[in-house]
Amino acid sequence: MADVPVFNPSLALAENPAYEATPFQKAMLAALAAGLLVLLVCLFSDLAARYPVPMFTLGGGLTVGGGLLYVVDRYRRLPPGVRNEATMFSSNQARGPVGWVLGLLLTGLYVLLYWYPHLLDGLIRVVDPLSYTIHGAAANQWFLYGTIYTAAVLVMGVRALLKYRHTKYQVVRTLSVMFFQLGFAFLIPQLLVRFREPELYFHYFWPLDYDLFFPPTAEYLLSEGRLGAFMLFWGAVLILIATPVLTYFFGKRWYCSWVCGCGGLAETAGDPYRHLSDKSTRAWRVERVLIHSILLFIVVTTGLLWADRAWGLLGGASSALAKWYGFYIGAIFSGVIGVGFYPLMGSRVWCRFGCPMAAILGLQQRFFSRFRITTNGGQCIACGNCSTYCEMGIDVRWYAQRGQSVIRASCVGCGMCATVCPRGVLRLENGPQEGRFGSAHLNLIGDLDVLEEPADGSR
Amino acid sequence: MHLVVLGNGVAGVTAARYVRQRDPSARITLVSDEAEHFFARTALMYAYMGQLTRGHLEPYERGFWGKNRLHLVHDRVERVDVAAKQLHLRSGEPLGYDRLLLATGSVPMFFGWPGQDLHGVQGLYHLQDLDRMEAATRGVERAVVVGGGLIGVEMAEMLHTRGVHVTFLIREPWAMGHFLPEEEGRLVERETRRHGIDLRTSTELERLVGDEGGRVRAAVTTTGEEIPAQFVGLTTGVRPNVDFLRESGIELNRGVLVDRCFRTSAPDVFAAGDCAEFREPLPGRKPVEQLWYTARAHGAFAAHAILGHPRPYRPGVFYNSAKFFDVEYQTYGRIDLRPPEGESTLYWEHPDGRAAARLQHETDGQRRVVGVSVMGARHRHAVWAAWIEAGWGVEAVLAALPSADFDPELTREVAPALVEAYNRQHGTWVRVQARRGWREWMARLPMRGNAAKTPLRASLHL
């Protein structure tokens, strides 16, 4: 199955030529552009340092307000239902010039955040008023990042809520990721800082939060009093008890598409790009090698750090390993590539190829879970909407055509395959493990002894 | 054995795959002049709408064909010589075969309207029709679609997403009047109009009017109304694509005549899919079946005959599906426009008018359910097929109805409303027994009273 071309020359921005922007929508887009302009000027001047509140109000207000009112008006006017028309004609969504430029800008933003934060100082000052309000101190680059991230999840979350308002599963799931981003990833950690406690993310744990169990972090947390110690305990509970139990009952979706911040961004800001994931079997092979190697990498690194610390076995070599992980995996892979490449490789590059947490959840989902996506007998018409809009690059249609359940380590249970299916073929289900894979007999193409093995024998 | 499959649609490709599975040594060639690679015909609309790319329409990766040694020939067969077992191709060398499967599908069927050959007038079936439609609808502001079948609704939706104003002419008194009862038809009408389509029922096309350049300018109805249109879609049905076989000596009627094992009158020649016509159709089934689902089943059965182990066609409980703009439709078993003597239907419609369900059942004896259709809801194929095949009575079906539910999690069940409608109509006290989700799980716990509540789905081994 061929994908969206790597580059398409279209400059068309409109997702659907049938729905031209209303005057109100144009005004809101203008407000958004004006807000971005204010932010750009702030970036290259000391304007925000001198006038923080006006710049925050203008830059932030116009950007968020304009964007929010635009998406509200746009999707409110569209009838509820699957509205993916013209996705493949969009310069933004189908790897046109707009998509490429956006990809470069996002990638650039991450490079600056991680390695040249002083260049962002002008912009960081813009969020000072918010930073003082919430945690009582000046902002740094991570506060700026958290603010942009949360704003993106909330604004694009509203978009997802409206776009998928005909499916309650999507609505509840989107509300869930918005809640966890705003509360657990933004407000709670910042308020903790305000109350002189360590900055803790209670929904974010090892191995995704890769250094949570590194000796220096553990020592720091223990030195920070009861809450720090609780975080260590809580992190252990989440990975050792909550993860296996919840994944057994619900599959990895309980985390990846309901709670996780990376997933939250992918499901909201990344939603317009979900179809850009690579569906080829080659990509699947790369996925399996890469994600499990990274899991091994972080497990070994964490183990060696403790061994080194206890017995000094490696003379500090383990901390070099930890640094490499932090740089190549933590920063470059999960940040720069993971989000920067949204408009080029889809919204789940990190989740699919890199995240060690997803690897653990995936292994369990594949071998010991009640979760599956059931396919509905012979109803599949092979249209390919499910595969196309799968952000994890799963060729869902391949299973649906033969009436087999989709049981894949990578499936995050976003439910979009079921949402976009025009014939009611797919359903996310939790059920007994027995008979979980379904069988070709159920594709009911007739009273035939359907062969067990697929012709191509590749899966 | 050299099998040549004529046509690489779902019937031909399914047959080729089955033959490859069973006979690793067979030489298999698929000939088509439509597309180099198999694609999902059902998804043509999504490519036009920009919901998918054309690449997305291909269910198999390109490497699939080579890996399974399915040789693809992109050419047109001009003539079949059954005596010499040879196909004469338009551009290539003649191609010999040991077994031949005709799976050439359909062609759009027009009814000799004046002006039907004007530029900008077309049907929608082949990939080439999509190309023509792309070219012919560029810059078009108004279009007319004629014919109230599924392709008509799809074409209306396609044009609508490109900002084209669509007038939709339907001969029947309500939408889908040839297979949907009135209530469902009205539901489809409301849904179509809600999207801004100018839908006219009981309206027939008289002729098409062109401009000086030979391009369509307007459609004229039998009442004399002239509707301006720069594009006209004729979706008044399809007929078997068998014209090139007229001289071949293979016995034809509307389609290629086949027995229940898909054998034609010529030795070693088989036919499957839209182009096949049963000499003796199965009871309750049409002689020419023109569905994607039936084509796939034909292909699987024909493969058995090709391999020398013929199996008579037994397609199981009928099923079909569609989507009318944003309303999905599924049906299992038999729903008649008007139930015959001794049968009646139970109809329920959601107050918002966008979801409905209908059960057709016998009125006497066991009151067996013979069919169901749901709109704006999803139901489980395997469960319905089992219930209908086993002849479950209507009250047992209603009591177990949640087991057939296939809507996404967190969606409110349709079943209670349907059961309530039945109880009101018959003064009965049927209660929904089977549960789904956590309640189903709870019901399996070893608690007193749970034995009686064992979910029926579990007892069906589904």
Image (cartoon, helix red, strand yellow):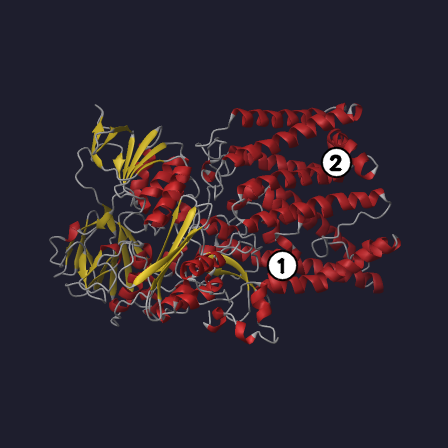
Residue B111 point in image, percent of width and height: 18, 41
Point 39% across, 65% down: residue = B394
Mark 1 crowdedness (10 Å alpha carbons): few <14, some 14-19, many ≥20: many
| Residue A344 visible in the shown view | no
Q: Which residue bears the numbered disc 2? A: A117
Q: Chain of mark 1?
A: A
Three-letter amino acid code at disc 2? Pro
Residue nearest the observer in this picture, A304 or B242: B242
Residue B194 point in image, percent of width and height: 42, 38
Residue B432 point in image, percent of width and height: 50, 64
Instruction: Give above or below for B131 relative to B442.
Output: above
Point 67% across, 36% down: residue = A109
Mark 2 crowdedness (10 Å alpha carbons): few <14, some 14-19, many ≥20: some
Point 39% across, 41% down: residue = B190
Instruction: Give above or below for A91 relative to B149.
Output: above
Q: Quadrant of residue B276?
A: bottom left
- Marks 2/1 in contact by CB < 8 Å: the verdict is no
| Residue B33 visible in the shown view | yes
- Does residue A219 appear to the left or right of B11 in the view shown? right
Residue nearest the observer in this picture, B350 or A110: B350
Q: Which residue bears the numbered disc 1? A: A359
Q: Chain of mark 2?
A: A
- Which badge, 2 or 1, comes first in the chain's sequence? 2
Q: Nearer the viewer, mark 2 or mark 1?
A: 1
Residue at the far front: name it. B427
Q: Do discs 2 and 1 share a chain?
A: yes
Q: Secondary structure at mark 2?
A: helix
Residue nearest the observer in this picture, B396 or B225: B396
Residue B8 point in image, percent of width and height: 30, 54
- Does residue A194 appear to the left or right of B103 in the view shown? right
Three-letter amino acid code at disc 1? Ala
